[in-house]
Image: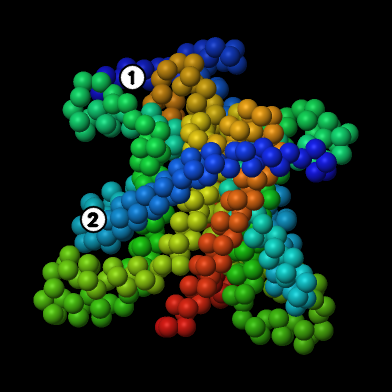
Amino acid sequence: MFANFDFDVIRRSLGYLFFDGMTFTLTLTGLATVGALVFGTLLALMRLSNSRLMGRIAGVYVDLMRSLPLVLVIFWFYFLVPYIGQWVTGSSRPVRVGAFTSSLVTFILFEAAYFSEIMRAGIQSISKGQPAAAQALGLTYSQTMRYVVLPQAFRNMLPVLLTQTIVLFQDTSLVYVLSIPDFLGAASKVAQRDGRLVEMYLFAAVVYFAISCVASFGVRRLQTRIAFVH
Amino acid sequence: MNYHWNWRIFWEPAPNGTGTYLDMLLSGLVLTIETAICAWIIALITGSIVGVMRTLPSKTASRIGFLYVEFFRNMPLLVQLFLWFFVLPEILPRAWGLWLKQMPNAPFFTATIGLGLFMSARVAEQLRSGIGALPRGQKLAATALGLTTAQTYRYVLLPMAFRIILPPLTSEFLSTIKNTSVAITIGLIELTAEARAMQEFSFQVFEAFTAATVLYLLVNVVVVIAMRFVERGLAVPGYITGK
């Protein structure tokens, strides 16, 4: 089975795979997580606010994103982002946007829907006495959220948020449909150039598996530690 | 926005000779649903077996179940489909590999099996937590009545556990439908792929994607409503959501 297995093709392309491909994947994962967390928290606050309209808007947005396949959303934004850019900058024609920016915008807007559901659960898990006490101390709404509710909600939900980040890390491989050289895209390029599909795809699978395994093991340890503190 | 909208495009004939653009999208929708249902059957059967294994008293069985779930959960679906589609035929004995490669409809079968196994790990985890959520007394009572382990699962634990996990199973089924679109990468011409093809033929990007979006939303709504009826029909009086 491994008789004509060419390990050298992996060794030769390691630099390209990790310095170009994996850097793209990890940067996209990191920035998208931060962006999606911020936007998702905003959506969660909108949903829990007293304003019916705001809650409605956030609810529709979250439900819409969660019922669409990520591949379709990637295509949507790939074509839509240039027009959004035109609208934002007020230029006369659609703005040319790079592959990275386009996928970053897509992942922030898409994953925010999932992060917002996690943050909503986190905010709702805080006992009513906390915001009530904050108000009694004379804190404003935004101070209550910033200093009392959100830090606790974030802490409680940390394991779930990290698990969602692992999902996001795996999902970034879907930028393959735009022929962007992320880690899988880079592996695929080498695979097709050298006719070494078996070696490259097996190697990519092993790398994704190792990273996700280590990360989810870490999350599990964190979870037991947090559970112990409570 | 200097984009030329043309909503009548759906009734114009598509260049691939299969009818109008609307027909094209609808045939993609049918393939999406077919793939999702076949994959879901595989996911339910395999997932149930693995989920039960994880709760068995046997250490080996639960260990195997754990490894199975970790294997399918820690790799992106896209990579798994590539392994099934590109790698498997090469590492099998020559004759089998050739047979696989010459199989008609290979993208469909690969997508069904790959997606089915990918989702089965999720089903297994849901079922495990469902069985774990049952009060311990259920299992003890079944043992006290003299039921074997198989009978305990068949008549006591599983009927209740499956009812408990119906809502999360519904959302796993919705994920299965959405995930069929990943098979676009191995050449399955499902709904997203048809929308993409329509965009390439007609240059009407936003009409094509809007139509696909609406169709996905419709499927979602239908599944959610249907499952609500199933849940109501299966509810046990005096328990969970039963009356």
Query: Residue A94 location in percent, x, y?
Result: 28, 24
**Residue shown at 44% from the left, 77% from the top:** A226
Query: Residue B10 location in percent, x, y?
Result: 46, 19
Which class describes the residues within 10 Å of circle 2: few (<14), some (14-19), or many (20+)?
few
Disc 2: which chain?
A
Does B116 sit left or right of A181 as displayed? right
Q: Secondary structure at mark 1?
A: loop
**Residue shown at 64% from the left, 29% from the top:** A192
Q: In the rendered image, is residue B112 in sight?
A: no
Outermost residue toward the left in this view:
A138
The three-letter code of the residue at mark 1 reads Trp
What is the CA distance from the residue labelled 2 to the residue labelled 1?
33 Å
Does A230 sit left or right of B118 as displayed? left
The three-letter code of the residue at mark 2 reads Arg
What colour-coding does the image apply? Answer: rainbow
Does A73 sit left or right of A154 as displayed? right
Q: Which residue is mark 1?
A: B5
**Residue shown at 35% from the left, 41% from the top:** A105
In the depicted view, which residue is nearer to us: B217 or A220?
A220
Q: Secondary structure at mark 2?
A: helix
Which of the image's four quarters has the N terminus of chain A? Answer: top right
Q: Which residue is mark 2?
A: A52
